Image (cartoon, grey):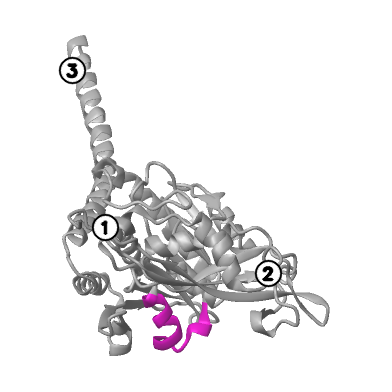
Amino acid sequence: MNEPMKRLIFLIICVLLSAGISAAQSYDELFAGEEALALRSAADSLSALGSEEALAAFVSRRLESSGLDVLGSADFRSFGIKSEDGDTLTCHNVIAWIPGYGKSLHDNYIVVSTNLSQSSATAISLFLSLAEKLATNKVLLQRSVLFAAFGGASHASAGSWYFLNRAFEESSRIDAFVHLDLFDNPNKAFYAYTASNADMNKIISAVSSSLQPALPVLTAREPAESDFRSFFGKEIPGVFFTTAEPLKKYHGGIDPLEYEELSRQCEYIYNFCVTLSGTAKPSFWPAQEKPAAVVSFDDCDTKPSFLGRTNPSFFLANWVYVYLRYPKYASENGIQGKVQVEFVIDEKGHVGQVTVVKGVHPSLDEEAIRVIEASPDWKPGLIAGKAVRTKLSVYVDFVLEKKKNKNKR
């Protein structure tokens, strides 16, 4: 073979190899891009829907098309909430499930949840993508997985409360939950809020120790008022995945370029759910950490006192209303009302477990929680001379000042 022919063959081989490498790279890029585009498309569609009912219908259709069994009874689909003016507001839940394949665990559940609201459009798109991934690979699941899109987000997380306390009769068989919300800034951070639960932290650490496309930061602070609290009220351990910085809330969607990172975070959460489905049941309270029983404020022989006074109104007047800051959004939109807040004063007088029992609006609810969580220590309550953990409930009243009529003489 002469020299020119050798050079020609060598050139052809180089061109073919180069084309093959480029094709492989293009395929990988195209695959990642398709998933990001699917997430973006779903988020855009959800953002365009104007009501909770429309969001519920969209989510239900997508879950069914992904092969999940959507539970269709009226108890799961809708529920009513009494408004302050006496009208009944209809809210919607969407519940679907994937059966587990473990011989001893298939009758137990993991709940994966999100909120049915326009501000949660990105999180819902991730929720739907995760459902599709798990349904496609359902043989890997030991426990059954319930996918729950909860309504009533602006009414103190009424959807999750209704599901756990009224609609779902097997809530005692829920071993753990995964909540998804506030995924508006995937390139800035990726958080896993576990409330410092030792068992959930171990599972997160185990998954993160393997090769993963994204890694969450463990944090002990909750980003915002959410359905997370309803599960904690039932002492069900879980994790809240989010991109919101602790104590901050984001709205308004994300830059399209960031959907690539969102797809990687979805893959991590998928791997976490598969692992969680087959692990030993996580404990809400490790034996050595379970606190003593909580008694009501009125059952104490000596009631807890704040700066020497046992009357809760003194605490409100001399702490809560002194440091309360009316949220700008609520002020600008004329939102006011009474937020019922429950909290525990432990044996050392520390204030904790601050939760909203009856909310008005997330902005007001979060401000009431913020001020009470920052409370100085109390003098603990006593029974038979022994300090006890005491539960107290108060109403934090948000009232807008009436604007004076400038034309009045």
Mark 2 Cα-neighbour bin, 10 Å: few <14, some 14–19, many ≥20: some
Q: Residue furthest top?
A: 3
Quarter of the image containing the N terminus?
top left
Say which residue label 3 marks.
8
How far apart marks 2 and 3 lie (CA) works out to 96 Å
> Where does the image place residue 106, in percent across and percent down from the top left?
48, 80
Looking at the rendered structure, the secondary structure element under dot 2 is loop
Q: Amino acid at mark 2?
A: Arg
Residue at numbered disc 1? 404
SS under mark 1: loop
Q: Is residue 194 visible?
A: no
- Callout 3, which amino acid? Leu
Provide the residue span drawn in magenta: 158-174
Residue 171 drawn in magenta: yes
Q: What type is the residue that disc 1 sits on? A: Lys
Q: Which secondary structure lies at badge 3?
A: helix
Q: Is residue 61 left or right of residue 399?
A: left
Residue 180, x across and y down, in percent: 40, 61
Which percent across, then down, holds residue 148? 36, 73
Quarter of the picture containing the C terminus is bottom left
Instruction: Give the Cα separation between the discs numbered 3 and 1.
Output: 90 Å
Disc 1 residue crowd, few under 14, some 14–19, many 20+, Cα 10 Å: few
Q: Are marks 3 and 1 in contact (CB under 8 Å)?
A: no
Neighbours of disc 3 within 10 Å: few (<14), some (14-19), many (20+):
few
- Looking at the picture, tell me which residue is in the foreground, 181 or 142: 181
Examine the image and state in which quarter residue 156 appears: bottom left
Question: What is the number of the mark on residue 309?
Answer: 2
| N-term-proximal mark, 3 vs 1 | 3
